[in-house]
Amino acid sequence: MRRLGPEEWSGLTMLVLCAGLGIPVIIGAADPDVPRPLWVGLFLLTFSAILVTFSLEEWPAAKRASYGAVVVLGWVVVLTVPNSGMLPVLLVVVAAAGTEVVRLSANLVVVALNTVVITLSLWRGDEEAMGLLFGASFYALIQVASVLSVVTIRREQQLRRELAETHVELQAASVLLQDAARTAERLRISRDLHDLIGHQLTVLTLELEAARHRPGEAAHEHVDRANRVARDLLADVRSTVGELRTAPSTELGEALRSVGRDVPGLDVGVEIGADVEVDEEQTGVLVRAMQEIVTNTLRHAGARELWVDIVRDGDAIRLTAADDGQGAPAVVAGNGLRGMTERFAALGGDVDYDGRNGFRVTARMPARTAARMAGGVAPR
């Protein structure tokens, strides 16, 4: 179950506060202009509309329409109680909630209309001119301050998310660059070994082979022994060169943990099966997949934790990633997910998504044998 963060607790606190504002009317301390059961129903409907509004993330038009209903219901609830006390605070919360739904300009229009409603409510409560002016100004300022504060917080959160995404991208690029640098260095060393030592030993073998046919039984025995040693040395050099060319250049677990390390607001766990072996190309695909998964989690899921497991599954390598975020019942693959799918498909694999409980990614690609990872040929 997803843990509640400061934002969720703040929202719940505001809902509890707003619910408390209606208690005077509910218990009979204030009389509405409409039958009390009808007013209570409108009050509860307002809260239901607020909850519905924030559950319509996938349907922006419906979300805006629901928010419009919240605004109108809030006006009705406040206007139908002449001596409303602190009930206008409900409209402050409604205005602040609009920052998630409409643009700032439209939000400020809502603030202005709310202020008119609050002024009418105070006027119906027989407020004097100074009290009316003070009350209307107070609530107008509170609404503007709340809206601007929420907008500022949202923008800061957006900047933090973008910074975190950039951090993940740089970490992935750093891993791949280090891998490429190590690969280039190994190839350079292997070429030098093969060209210098291997060439010399080959010449030595040819020379000894020629000497073996010369007269002299004692010399023939020593030459044969030297010939075997030279051939063994040449085989050792070739084996070393092959290992340098095919050995994994980056420890997979450390590479993936580097991508998810120190991501603000997200705890990333990575587990790699002991029998998982990948080559350089597969490592690059897995690193890019890790980057895309972490970035998507930051951008869309609102999650606190992300778990990534890579195991050997028969003849395949399987990556499974799951978070504790809000999920997405209808997954729409963007450029990032499509790119990840294409990378796995290029290696003969596939990718599946599931957004019903958090967001889950399952990706597979064929495991490669040692000979295939080595390129299938011996160095020459």
Image: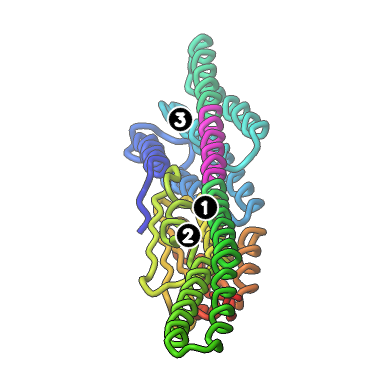
Measured as percent of width and height from the top left, residue 67 is found at 58, 45
User: Where are the magenta residues, as a range?
Assistant: 148-167
Q: Indicate the quadrant containing the C terminus: top left, top right, bottom left or bottom right.
A: bottom right
- Image point (59%, 79%), residue name: 206
Using the image, determine if residue 289 lies above or below residue 295.
below
- Image point (56%, 43%), residue name: 166
Query: Disc 3 to disc 1, how far (Cα)?
Result: 52 Å
- Based on the displayed image, in which of its 4 quarters is residue 225 positioned? bottom left
Dot 3 amino acid type: Val
Residue denoted by label 1: 175
The residue sitting at the top extreme is: 130
Q: Which of marks 2 and 3 is nearer the N terminus?
A: 3
Residue denoted by label 2: 250
> Would you call the spot at circle 2 few (<14 residues within 10 Å), some (14-19), or many (20 or more)?
many
Q: Magenta stretch: dominant SS?
A: helix
Judging depth in this view, the residue of 22 and 53 nearest the camera is: 53
Disc 1 element: helix
Q: Of circles 1 and 2, which is in front?
A: 2
Dot 1 amino acid type: Val
> Would you call the spot at circle 3 few (<14 residues within 10 Å), some (14-19), or many (20 or more)?
some
Using the image, determine if residue 44 lies above or below residue 186.
above
Q: Indicate the quadrant containing the N terminus: top left, top right, bottom left or bottom right.
A: bottom left
Q: Does the magenta stretch include residue 165?
A: yes
> Would you call the spot at circle 1 few (<14 residues within 10 Å), some (14-19), or many (20 or more)?
some
Query: Disc 1 to disc 2, how far (Cα)?
Result: 8 Å
Is any atom of residue 196 visible in this view? yes
Cβ atoms under marks 1 and 2 closer than 8 Å:
yes
Q: Is residue 178 magenta?
A: no
Residue denoted by label 3: 89
Colour pattern of the rendering: rainbow
Q: Earlier in the sequence, mark 3 or mark 1?
A: 3
Q: Which of marks 1 and 2 is nearer the N terminus?
A: 1
